[in-house]
Amino acid sequence: MPTILSLEQALALPYATQRFVHLGWRVIRIESPAESDENAGDPNRYIGTDLGYHDLHSYFIAPNLGKEAITINLRTKEGQELLKKIIHELKVDVFMCNTLPKRYKSLGIDYETLRQVNPELIWCGISAMGPSYPDRAGYDPALQALLGFTYLTGEADGTPVPCGIPVIDLKAGDEAFTQVILALMEKKDKKIGKQIDISMAQCAASWLITALPQLEFTSSEDELFKRSGNEHRSFIPSNAYPTKDGFVYLAIGNDIQWKKLVSEQKFKNLDKTERRTNEGRMKEKNEIYQEIGSVTKTFTTSEFVNYCMHLNLSVSPINTIKEVAELPFLNNNFLKTTLPSGKVVKLCPPSYNTDFLTENNFYLKCSPRLGEDNAKILGLA
């Protein structure tokens, strides 16, 4: 299996390399060593619930399962030479990093330097905007604001808000994972290395596929792109509706589904000729939302979900995260690990159930402490 050496911190790159762990590949993360009493290494080590170890808090656990960890001071010539020796001795296939591009050469981690050790090395760097903007830092909430995600999210008359999860970090991580896999496939034929530069901003903008292209087709930018709360901007009446004990999301995605809904006795009053097309429903969307809501609130959430599923309509309860964790189709696929305390915990499912994970019952070694593998790995160099 390939070996990944990764100078990583925060989430975007640790998430990418975690996906390689799911394949059973060896991932070694590099961090800065402790100096005096500072919080050394990845700042995420010190975020979240204290698990009894200063350098191993809860936020750090999930993206770093199954990895090894070493510390190298790359600000020194000795540290840079040590890095080269590790790449040579361990026959490292892929080097990855998510530090500022302006620091690549000063830390001795740039592609041209490291390819001298291994001409077939795959090199991948994640940064805010790629090497053309070498000193631009990239943090998910700020990038969501820059790239329009925040502008598009929230109630129409409310404050712009970011998405509830760090989607740009995760998108960039997935892209890095994909491009490294493709480069390794290409390397089998060409026997050459490759430099891959991942721009978090470009990754994010690629997801604006339902927004940016519309600039070519509309003269009413403000109307098209204003925040829309829970309603879908294009398909009416996809929205959240109240029930007796919570909320449901009903997604009506086409005219056939609308016909199914209004053919039911409880919704017959909504059936009007002018509403039989999505364009017609758009003109009366607020009235339709109110009329549907007056019906849904006569059901409990589970009653309405069952009612719509019987009609093969797309409907879901609006679940809490705790309720998501209890969904039966996910429950058996959660990654598991054992904390230093000895407690076995379930974390989250992988995006895909790889053979390696299935064979290991979705169990991975707990995320490493700072420099945990120094003796084992640095001793080889």
Image (cartoon, grey):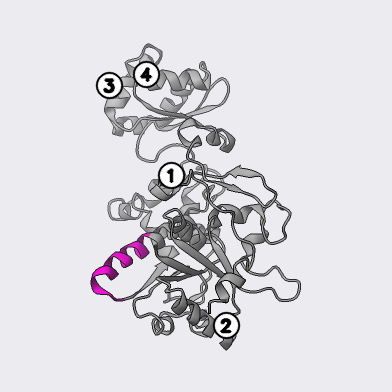
Whole-number angstrom distance, CA of label 2 to CA of label 3: 74 Å
Residue at numbered disc 4: 310
Residue at numbered disc 2: 79
Instruction: Point out the frontmost of discs 4 and 2.
Output: 2
Q: What segment is highlighted magenta in the picture?
A: 178-192
| In this picture, residue 280 sits left or right of residue 43 | left
Question: With respect to residue 6, does 304 lie above or below?
Answer: above
* Magenta stretch: includes residue 189: yes
Whole-number angstrom distance, CA of label 2 to CA of label 1: 38 Å
The one nearer the camera, 302 or 154, is 302
Residue type pointed to by label 2: Gly
Residue type pointed to by label 4: His
Note whether residue 276 is visible: no
The secondary structure type at the circle numbered 1 is helix
| In this picture, residue 169 sits left or right of residue 216 | right
Residue type pointed to by label 1: Thr
Image disc number at residue 232? none
Whole-number angstrom distance, CA of label 4 to CA of label 3: 25 Å
Image disc number at residue 273? 3
Question: How far across and down, in percent of the image, does residue 72 sit?
Answer: 59, 77
Instruction: Point out the frontmost of discs 4 and 3.
Output: 4
Question: With respect to residue 140, does 280 lie above or below?
Answer: above
> Of callouts 1 and 4, which one flags the residue occurring earlier in the amino acid sequence?
4
Question: How far across and down, in percent of the image, does residue 274 sit?
Answer: 29, 25
Residue at numbered disc 1: 358
> Of callouts 2 and 3, which one flags the residue occurring earlier in the amino acid sequence?
2
